[in-house]
Image (cartoon, helix red, strand yellow):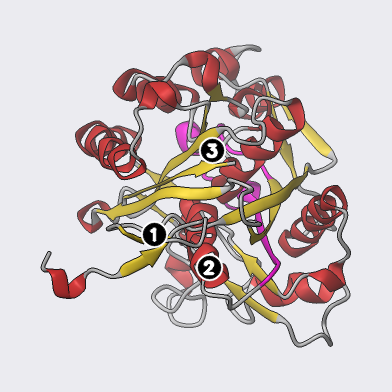
Amino acid sequence: MGAAFETNKIDCTGQAEFQPHLQRCVKILATGSYVPRTTIASTEIDARLGKRAGWTQRLFGIEKRHYAAPDESTSFMAAEAGRDALAKAGLNVDDIDCIVAACGVGEQPIPSTAVLVQNKLGLGRSGIAAFDVNSTCLSFVTAFDTVADAIAMGRYKCVLIVSSDIASCGLDWSNPEAAAIFGDGAAAVVVAPSPSGDGARILSSRMNTYGTFQDTCRLEAGGTRINATREADRFQDATTFKMDGPEALECVVNHLPAFVGELCQQAKLSVGTLDAAILHQASHHALGVVQDLIGFDPNKMVLIFKQFGNQIATSIPHALDQAVSSGAVKRGDKVMLLGTSAGISFGGMVIEY
């Protein structure tokens, strides 16, 4: 890239520094989460599938997951997770000036889920910005990356990012691989500028997308292509999630190692120097493959799949909340957020927490 496209950046200490990537000085003030009331044990999935007790856990490595009740809507769970994060940060809802909903699947097409969350938080007349950011399972990472830019530029001072997903409402039980591994839930973070000398910052961020794999993971209904008015005969089947696991895994094997290498190079560190790896909890098998491919220290991987399953976009922020709450991630730690999403896309960030 020519010099005309490079910019003189300002580092976190306020001194001018010529660098290709701006290390944005933003801080996660607190994390939060919400788990639906209903717990579904793997033995219940066994019964539904007509299998012997223990079949689901043995095959998919999941003990239990949570399914949302009818009164636990996407926006309700998001608002509850948001309140949890705000309380941990010692803030009130009036302290935030932007709400971003980063859900894999929104509550409805129009208006955005963030609007519904704003209203549930009692901010419906506040006028603060509320919008959605979607890149399916990577929605939280994409939203955090986007919000960090806006905060670094002075656009917002305190942003609530919420991820909330109800996977249980769109499962295809004729395909256990694409149904048994999912769970519901919500998570949230409060993001603000990092005070001078605090150290919290984003060291690197990347996203690569390979659209040739667009049919590998798909939920086709709910938009303008397949709808109940025009194609009633196709609509019902199109409301369930379809996945080609082997093809998705092939894409991961072929592209993820180079992607992580570029992410680490930008952050000027190695995988071995990370304090924690917060991964999308895609599946038990996928997590093992990623560990082998990248060489993550298993003691530094934050794994919640066994207890919560694949929660779509909620997986990464929920794992982060679990890590922060348990002390596995502490202030000053260098943490990688990493995942894949339908598309297929790879997304990641390295942050100094």
Q: Amino acid at mark 3?
A: Ala
Q: Amino acid at mark 2?
A: Ala
Residue 178: say if magenta.
yes
Q: Residues within 10 Å of mark 2 (few under 14, many from 20)?
A: some
Q: Measure the C-alpha gap from mark 2 to mark 3.
A: 40 Å
Q: Earlier in the sequence, mark 2 or mark 1?
A: 1
Q: Measure the C-alpha gap from mark 3 to mark 1.
A: 41 Å
Q: Is residue 139 left or right of residue 7?
A: right
The residue closer to the viewer here, 208 or 275, is 275
Q: Which residue is mark 3?
A: 179
Q: Amino acid at mark 1?
A: Leu
Q: Quadrant of residue 50?
A: top right
Q: Nearer the viewer, mark 3 or mark 1?
A: 1
Q: Earlier in the sequence, mark 2 or mark 3?
A: 2
Q: Quadrant of residue 110?
A: bottom right
Q: Which residue is mark 1?
A: 22
Q: Measure the C-alpha gap from mark 2 to mark 1.
A: 10 Å
Q: Which residue is mark 2?
A: 152
Residue 125: say if magenta.
no
The residue closer to the viewer here, 184 or 337, is 337
Observer able to see residue 21: yes
Q: Is residue 150 left or right of residue 287?
A: right
The residue closer to the viewer here, 285 or 235, is 285
Q: Residue shown at 31%/48% (left/top)?
A: 216
Tell whether label 1 touches label 2 (CB within 8 Å). Answer: yes
Q: Secondary structure at mark 2?
A: helix
Examine the rendered structure and indicate whether residue 99 appears above or below residue 211: below
